[in-house]
Image (tube, rainbow, N blue to C red):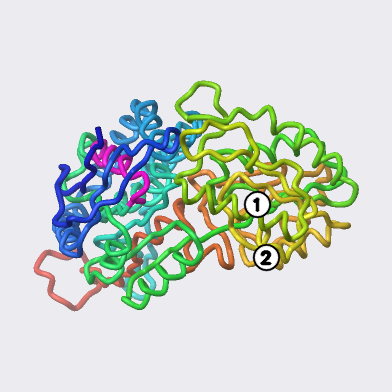
Amino acid sequence: MVKQISHWLDGAVVRGTSDRTSPVFNPGTGEHTGDVELATRSDVDRVVASGRAAAKSWRRASLSTRSAVLFGFRELLAKNVDELSRLVTSEHGKVLADAAGEVARGLENVEFACGVPQLMKGGYSEQVATDVDAYSIRQPLGVVAGITPFNFPVMVPLWMAANAIACGNAFVLKPSEKDPSASLFLAELWRRAGLPDGVFNVVQGDKEAVDALLEHPDIAAVSFVGSTPIARYIYERGTQAGKRVQALGGAKNHMVVLPDADIDVAADAAVSAAYGAAGERCMAVSVVVAVGDSGDPLVEAIAGRLPKLRIGSGAEPGVEMGPLITSEHRQKVSAYIAAGAESGARVVVDGRDADVPSSGFFLGTTLLDDVKPDMSVYTDEIFGPVLCVVRVATYDDAVALINANTYANGTAIFTRDGGAARRFQFDVEVGMVGINVPIPVPVAYYSFGGWKASLFGDSHMYGPEGIAFYTRGKVVTARWPDPATSAIDLGFPTTR
């Protein structure tokens, strides 16, 4: 039975006014499982109006009250990991272990936000002038929106919503129309945790809903994670409308392997980071940079591991890689593999020939060697299970290659040399760096974000920068004359 997926408004699922819907599939079977409503501008207006009304009272809630709601939400998330993971797998396709890991990383951000009484502290200076004190405070923005991608339907919304709500804002979530059900599950958990109606709303939709949010006068800020072209669009349209915007874009993450590295460790890391979640991660390693004579043994080690990787429905036990999100995306990734072969890359393992389930949107793992920087498989974000190997002669060549790339989201180096590792973190022009760690996603009390075409705006996601993004600083200068010295009659006795 095909389910209808609607919006969340004022603590309940509600139907919208649109007659447009988008199909939702189970990528592991290819089955059409749902139809999600696509909001009209009037639907967006209703959701934002609800948030605006709720924000007025929520910003007055004490920090301890907000923290109590977040702690309650955290407990409900922890108790429902399995159910939420199954829901993610049913619409995204990632294996259950990946889905549970996604929930766990989102949970970390909720735990960080539980400390809002500490996070919202300002500063105080006494006697900046005679009888004058000055202090700083942080105040919420009002109604803020999050536009999130299909590849992390739980984690990325929690990157945004936990801090936004903790800071006293109302939050409007516009999830991907490809896997929208997790958004309603989160909304229900927020309600059960005691969050007042209207503080967390969900509007389902496509570009019409996105544009309505970007142009709405009552939306103060927009957070986005997705591809670079859309991130640029979100940033330009949002800032033109006077909004604060953080827009995280695409990636082409490099993993440098120096000749002194443990090849087996590096190969295991490359396989996990490149093919986990079928490569549909903005932090996936998509390029291995083999330095010097590390190339041949590294390619051999990676290729030897790929036949052992079990591919199938993410809901099946023991499966290590699931399908791609849609049949259209599978075709797009297959076209990149063909283009790489035609341009001269050596196809070591061809995912198009893999023995994968006939139903669902599956593609096997691909390994391309001798990739050159002018090939489309190198320049473009493929977002699939394709790993490119670029060979360079020296460490300096590796750093120059990375620094010349348009993207600068994440990178990693594998080496036994501490001096080389320290030099790498100093030299490389990338926002997140891993040393013998292939996917350097920061823990929740740091902040996530790249440089260059991987970020539009100047604010990274979650952590301390998230708190700053969802609040405005205010400085108060106050004079309270000392009644013992002031000539002003304050109406109460003085001591001389």
Q: Position of residue 14 (x, y in %)?
A: 14, 46
Measure the alpha-carbon separation of dots 1 and 2. 20 Å
Q: Position of residue 64 (x, y in %)?
A: 26, 42
Q: Quadrant of residue 279?
A: top right
The residue at the point 84 percent across, 52 percent down is 291
SS under mark 1: helix
Looking at the rendering, the stretch of residues picked out in magenta corresponds to 175-190
Q: Is residue 139 left or right of residue 225?
A: left
List the single residue furthest toward the top.
317
Q: Quadrant of residue 409?
A: bottom right
Q: Which mark is residue 194?
A: none
Looking at this view, is 437 or 303 the one in front? 303
In this view, 239 is above or below 295: below
Q: Magenta includes 65? A: no
- Res. 133 in view: no
Looking at this view, is 288 or 345 the one in front? 345
| Identity, as a three-letter code, of the amino acid under mark 2 | Asn
Q: Which mark is residue 337?
A: 1
Looking at this view, is 74 or 371 the one in front? 371
- Res. 338 in view: yes
Q: Nearer the viewer, mark 1 or mark 2?
A: 1
| Identity, as a three-letter code, of the amino acid under mark 1 | Ile
**Residue hosting label 2:** 405
